Image (cartoon, helix red, strand yellow):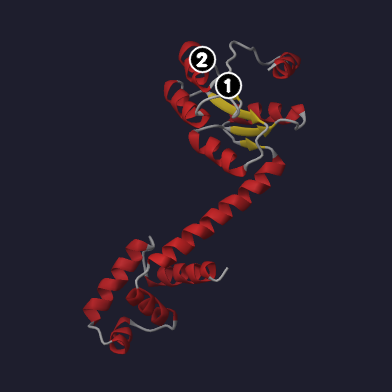
Amino acid sequence: MEGVSALLKRWGDFTLTATGNVADHIVSIARTHHPDEMIVDLNMAGDVFQAIADALKIAPEMKIIVFTASTSPDDAIRALDAGAKGHVLKGSPGEDLFQALQAARRGDVYVTPALAIKMIGALQDKALERQKAMSNKLSIREKQIVKLLLLGKMNSEIARELSLSAKTVKGYMTNLMAKLNVLNRVELALEVQKLEAAATR
Protein backbone atom coordinates (compact mmCIF):
# COMPACT_ATOMS: atom_id res chain seq x y z
CA MET A 1 0.00 0.00 0.00
CA GLU A 2 2.97 2.32 0.50
CA GLY A 3 3.49 2.50 -3.25
CA VAL A 4 -0.18 3.23 -3.87
CA SER A 5 -0.20 5.89 -1.14
CA ALA A 6 2.79 7.58 -2.76
CA LEU A 7 1.04 7.57 -6.13
CA LEU A 8 -2.14 9.05 -4.64
CA LYS A 9 -0.13 11.84 -3.01
CA ARG A 10 1.70 12.52 -6.26
CA TRP A 11 -1.54 12.81 -8.20
CA GLY A 12 -2.88 15.21 -5.57
CA ASP A 13 -6.55 14.62 -6.38
CA PHE A 14 -6.98 11.72 -3.97
CA THR A 15 -6.90 11.40 -0.18
CA LEU A 16 -6.19 8.13 1.61
CA THR A 17 -8.81 7.73 4.34
CA ALA A 18 -8.41 4.09 5.43
CA THR A 19 -6.54 0.88 4.73
CA GLY A 20 -7.31 -2.79 5.27
CA ASN A 21 -5.68 -6.17 4.76
CA VAL A 22 -8.55 -8.71 4.74
CA ALA A 23 -11.73 -8.96 2.70
CA ASP A 24 -13.94 -8.02 5.64
CA HIS A 25 -12.21 -4.64 5.80
CA ILE A 26 -13.64 -3.81 2.37
CA VAL A 27 -17.12 -3.93 3.87
CA SER A 28 -16.25 -2.21 7.13
CA ILE A 29 -14.47 0.65 5.36
CA ALA A 30 -17.43 1.10 3.03
CA ARG A 31 -19.77 1.21 6.02
CA THR A 32 -17.65 3.58 8.11
CA HIS A 33 -16.13 5.92 5.54
CA HIS A 34 -18.26 5.71 2.37
CA PRO A 35 -15.21 6.58 0.22
CA ASP A 36 -15.65 7.79 -3.36
CA GLU A 37 -13.14 5.20 -4.57
CA MET A 38 -11.61 2.06 -3.08
CA ILE A 39 -8.54 0.17 -4.30
CA VAL A 40 -8.74 -3.57 -3.56
CA ASP A 41 -6.23 -6.42 -3.84
CA LEU A 42 -7.64 -9.85 -4.75
CA ASN A 43 -4.90 -11.50 -2.67
CA MET A 44 -6.45 -10.27 0.57
CA ALA A 45 -7.56 -13.05 2.91
CA GLY A 46 -11.24 -13.94 2.61
CA ASP A 47 -13.81 -13.83 -0.17
CA VAL A 48 -12.86 -10.59 -1.89
CA PHE A 49 -15.45 -10.96 -4.65
CA GLN A 50 -18.31 -11.27 -2.17
CA ALA A 51 -16.88 -8.43 -0.12
CA ILE A 52 -16.89 -6.17 -3.19
CA ALA A 53 -20.54 -6.98 -3.84
CA ASP A 54 -21.48 -6.47 -0.17
CA ALA A 55 -19.59 -3.17 0.07
CA LEU A 56 -21.39 -1.81 -2.98
CA LYS A 57 -24.74 -2.63 -1.39
CA ILE A 58 -23.73 -0.37 1.51
CA ALA A 59 -22.16 2.36 -0.65
CA PRO A 60 -23.56 1.94 -4.19
CA GLU A 61 -21.95 5.16 -5.47
CA MET A 62 -18.47 3.99 -4.48
CA LYS A 63 -16.10 3.01 -7.30
CA ILE A 64 -13.96 -0.05 -6.64
CA ILE A 65 -10.73 -0.62 -8.54
CA VAL A 66 -8.97 -3.97 -8.28
CA PHE A 67 -5.18 -3.57 -8.13
CA THR A 68 -3.65 -7.03 -8.03
CA ALA A 69 -0.92 -9.38 -9.19
CA SER A 70 -3.49 -11.88 -10.44
CA THR A 71 -3.31 -12.20 -14.22
CA SER A 72 -6.27 -14.60 -14.35
CA PRO A 73 -8.94 -13.35 -16.78
CA ASP A 74 -11.52 -15.33 -14.78
CA ASP A 75 -10.59 -13.34 -11.66
CA ALA A 76 -10.99 -10.10 -13.58
CA ILE A 77 -14.38 -11.17 -14.93
CA ARG A 78 -15.56 -12.19 -11.44
CA ALA A 79 -14.39 -8.87 -9.99
CA LEU A 80 -16.23 -6.87 -12.64
CA ASP A 81 -19.32 -9.05 -12.20
CA ALA A 82 -19.17 -8.26 -8.47
CA GLY A 83 -19.28 -4.57 -9.31
CA ALA A 84 -15.67 -3.42 -9.62
CA LYS A 85 -15.12 -0.62 -12.12
CA GLY A 86 -11.54 -1.43 -12.99
CA HIS A 87 -8.88 -4.14 -12.91
CA VAL A 88 -5.25 -3.05 -12.95
CA LEU A 89 -2.29 -5.41 -12.81
CA LYS A 90 0.51 -4.73 -10.35
CA GLY A 91 3.65 -4.05 -12.34
CA SER A 92 1.71 -1.96 -14.84
CA PRO A 93 2.74 1.70 -15.23
CA GLY A 94 1.39 3.85 -12.39
CA GLU A 95 -0.59 5.78 -14.94
CA ASP A 96 -2.77 2.69 -15.47
CA LEU A 97 -4.11 2.97 -11.93
CA PHE A 98 -4.67 6.69 -12.39
CA GLN A 99 -6.53 6.08 -15.65
CA ALA A 100 -8.68 3.41 -13.95
CA LEU A 101 -9.64 5.81 -11.16
CA GLN A 102 -10.44 8.57 -13.61
CA ALA A 103 -12.44 6.21 -15.82
CA ALA A 104 -14.45 5.06 -12.80
CA ARG A 105 -15.25 8.67 -11.94
CA ARG A 106 -16.62 9.10 -15.45
CA GLY A 107 -18.73 5.97 -15.07
CA ASP A 108 -16.50 3.91 -17.37
CA VAL A 109 -14.68 0.62 -16.79
CA TYR A 110 -10.91 0.27 -17.17
CA VAL A 111 -8.91 -2.95 -17.53
CA THR A 112 -5.16 -3.22 -18.09
CA PRO A 113 -4.93 -3.61 -21.91
CA ALA A 114 -2.91 -6.84 -21.84
CA LEU A 115 -5.44 -8.43 -19.49
CA ALA A 116 -8.40 -7.10 -21.47
CA ILE A 117 -7.28 -9.18 -24.47
CA LYS A 118 -7.19 -12.31 -22.29
CA MET A 119 -10.63 -11.47 -20.90
CA ILE A 120 -12.10 -11.26 -24.39
CA GLY A 121 -10.66 -14.69 -25.18
CA ALA A 122 -12.02 -16.14 -21.93
CA LEU A 123 -15.48 -14.70 -22.57
CA GLN A 124 -15.48 -16.12 -26.10
CA ASP A 125 -14.50 -19.53 -24.72
CA LYS A 126 -17.31 -19.37 -22.15
CA ALA A 127 -19.81 -18.39 -24.84
CA LEU A 128 -18.62 -21.33 -26.94
CA GLU A 129 -19.01 -23.69 -23.99
CA ARG A 130 -22.56 -22.41 -23.40
CA GLN A 131 -23.42 -22.94 -27.06
CA LYS A 132 -22.06 -26.49 -26.97
CA ALA A 133 -23.99 -27.21 -23.78
CA MET A 134 -27.19 -25.86 -25.33
CA SER A 135 -26.66 -27.97 -28.44
CA ASN A 136 -26.33 -31.06 -26.25
CA LYS A 137 -29.63 -30.19 -24.55
CA LEU A 138 -31.59 -30.58 -27.78
CA SER A 139 -33.47 -33.87 -28.02
CA ILE A 140 -33.01 -36.20 -30.99
CA ARG A 141 -36.40 -35.11 -32.37
CA GLU A 142 -35.53 -31.43 -31.94
CA LYS A 143 -32.27 -31.97 -33.79
CA GLN A 144 -34.18 -33.70 -36.61
CA ILE A 145 -36.55 -30.74 -36.85
CA VAL A 146 -33.86 -28.07 -36.86
CA LYS A 147 -31.91 -30.02 -39.49
CA LEU A 148 -34.93 -29.84 -41.80
CA LEU A 149 -35.50 -26.21 -40.82
CA LEU A 150 -32.00 -25.38 -42.04
CA LEU A 151 -32.89 -27.00 -45.38
CA GLY A 152 -35.67 -24.43 -45.71
CA LYS A 153 -38.52 -26.84 -45.00
CA MET A 154 -41.87 -25.48 -43.83
CA ASN A 155 -43.71 -26.98 -40.86
CA SER A 156 -46.01 -29.02 -43.11
CA GLU A 157 -43.02 -30.48 -45.00
CA ILE A 158 -41.18 -31.26 -41.75
CA ALA A 159 -44.34 -32.96 -40.46
CA ARG A 160 -44.56 -35.18 -43.54
CA GLU A 161 -40.89 -36.19 -43.46
CA LEU A 162 -40.98 -37.06 -39.76
CA SER A 163 -44.49 -38.56 -39.80
CA LEU A 164 -45.75 -36.00 -37.32
CA SER A 165 -48.77 -33.74 -37.29
CA ALA A 166 -48.30 -30.10 -38.26
CA LYS A 167 -49.54 -29.16 -34.79
CA THR A 168 -46.82 -31.28 -33.17
CA VAL A 169 -44.13 -29.66 -35.31
CA LYS A 170 -45.47 -26.23 -34.44
CA GLY A 171 -45.25 -27.18 -30.76
CA TYR A 172 -41.63 -28.25 -31.20
CA MET A 173 -40.85 -24.96 -32.97
CA THR A 174 -42.40 -22.97 -30.14
CA ASN A 175 -40.40 -24.91 -27.55
CA LEU A 176 -37.19 -24.53 -29.55
CA MET A 177 -37.66 -20.76 -29.83
CA ALA A 178 -38.18 -20.53 -26.07
CA LYS A 179 -35.20 -22.78 -25.36
CA LEU A 180 -32.87 -20.80 -27.63
CA ASN A 181 -34.37 -17.42 -26.68
CA VAL A 182 -35.34 -16.36 -30.21
CA LEU A 183 -38.52 -14.84 -31.60
CA ASN A 184 -39.04 -16.38 -35.03
CA ARG A 185 -37.97 -19.08 -37.48
CA VAL A 186 -35.24 -16.94 -39.03
CA GLU A 187 -33.63 -16.22 -35.66
CA LEU A 188 -34.03 -19.89 -34.76
CA ALA A 189 -32.23 -20.98 -37.92
CA LEU A 190 -29.39 -18.51 -37.27
CA GLU A 191 -29.02 -19.65 -33.66
CA VAL A 192 -28.97 -23.30 -34.69
CA GLN A 193 -26.22 -22.53 -37.20
CA LYS A 194 -24.20 -20.96 -34.38
CA LEU A 195 -24.73 -24.05 -32.24
CA GLU A 196 -23.63 -26.34 -35.04
CA ALA A 197 -20.52 -24.23 -35.67
CA ALA A 198 -19.71 -24.33 -31.95
CA ALA A 199 -20.17 -28.09 -31.81
CA THR A 200 -17.61 -28.65 -34.56
CA ARG A 201 -14.87 -26.57 -32.90
Describe the element under mark 2 as helix, strand or loop: helix
Check the image and report above or below for 17 versus 61. above
For label 1, the crowd category at 10 Å Cα-Cα, with few meaning under 14, some 14 to 19 and many 20 or more, is many
Q: Is there any visible trace of residue 118 in the rendered image?
A: yes
Q: Tell me if 177 is positioned left or right of 121 in this view.
A: left
Q: Position of residue 91 (x, y in %)?
A: 75, 31
Mark drawn on residue 29: 2
* Near-viewer residue (45 or 107): 45
* Mark 1 lies on residue: 38
* Quadrant in which the N terminus appears: top right
* Quadrant in which the C terminus appears: bottom right
- Assess whether mark 1 and mark 2 are in contact (beta carbons under 8 angstroms): yes
Describe the element under mark 1 as helix, strand or loop: strand
Check the image and report above or below for 74 versus 142. above
Which picture quadrant has residue 37?
top right
Task: Kindly report the distance in space between the C-alpha atoms of the residues bearing marks 2 and 1.
Answer: 9 Å
Q: Residue at left 75%, top 27%?
A: 94
